[in-house]
Image (spheres, grey):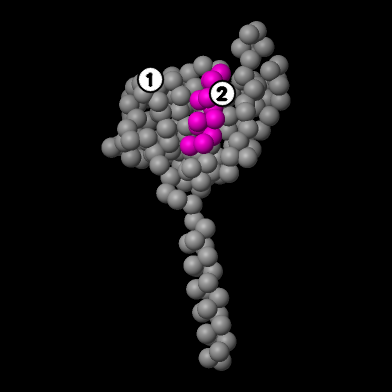
Amino acid sequence: MTSKLYATSLLTFSALVSGCASAPPPIETAANVDLPRFMGDWYVIANIPTFVEKNAYNAIESYALADDGTIATTFSFNKGGFDGKRKVYNPTGYIRDVESNAVWGMQFIWPFKAEYRVLYVDDQYQQTIIGRTKRDYVWIMARTPEISPDDYFRHIKFLREQGYDTNKIQRVPQNWSDETSD
C-alpha cells in the first residue's frame, strides 16, 4: 500500500512539474489604452478565429463608449465570401482593469464574459492586437483594411514571443473596392 501511494504521489508531482514547465509566459498587455482614441472602426487583418468568424470576409470590429462606462461593440462580416450574407453581432465590453484599460470582459451571452486583452496598440492608434491569456484566439486589427508586410510580420513575431502558435493565425480577406459588403 505504501509503495502504491508513493508511486501515485510521484506521478502527481511529475505531472505538476511538467505542467509548470510547459506553461506559457505571462501575456503582456498595452501599458495604457486611451479609451476615447481606441473607439471607432477596426478592420480585422488576421486572427485565430472563433467558430463564428470562420470564413469571414470584410470583418470589422467597432467600439463606442456608452454612458454607463461599458463599450458598445459591433462585430460585422460577410459570411463565406465578399458577397456573402452580412452578419452582425453586438457584444458588450466591460473594462476589468481601469488603471490600464487594457483588460476587458466581452459579453456575447449573459452572464458569460470572455477575456479580452489589448496586447498592443501603436502610438497613433492605427494598429492593435487583441488576445487572451489562453492564447486560443487573437485579432490583429487596423484602422485601414490593409497593413504593410513589415507591420504584419512584426505583429506575428510579437505574438510568437507572447507564446502564440502563429501557424494558427489566418489572414482575413478585406476588399472594399465595391459595394458587395452592404
Of residues 57 and 76, which is closer to you in this image? 57
Q: Position of residue 136 (x, y in %)?
A: 56, 44
Query: 149 and 66: which one is in front?
Result: 149
Snapshot quadrant of residue 120: top left
Look at the image and say whether residue 152 sits in the magenta stretch: yes
- Magenta-colored segment: predominant secondary structure: helix
Hey, what amino acid is under mark 1? Gln
Residue 18 on the magenta span: no
The quadrant in which the N terminus is found is bottom right
Q: Residue at x 51, y 16 (%)?
A: 144
Please tell me which residue is depicted at 32% across the width and 26% down the height of the picture: 34
**Is disc 2 placed on a helix, strand or loop?**
helix
Crowding near the residue tagged with mark 2, few <14, some 14–19, many ≥20 C-alpha atoms within 10 Å: few
111 above or below 145?
A: below
Q: Is residue 158 visible?
A: yes
- Return the residue nearer the eye: 24 or 89: 24
Which numbered circle lies on residue 149? 2
Q: Secondary structure at mark 1?
A: loop
Q: Quadrant of residue 80?
A: top right
Q: Residue at x 36, y 23 (%)?
A: 123
Instruction: Give the magenta-colored segment's residue range.
Output: 146-158
The residue tagged 1 is 124
Amino acid on which disc 2 is placed? Pro
172 lies left or right of 131:
right
- Residue 132: x %, y % from top left: 48, 42
- Looking at this view, is 107 or 129 the one in front? 129
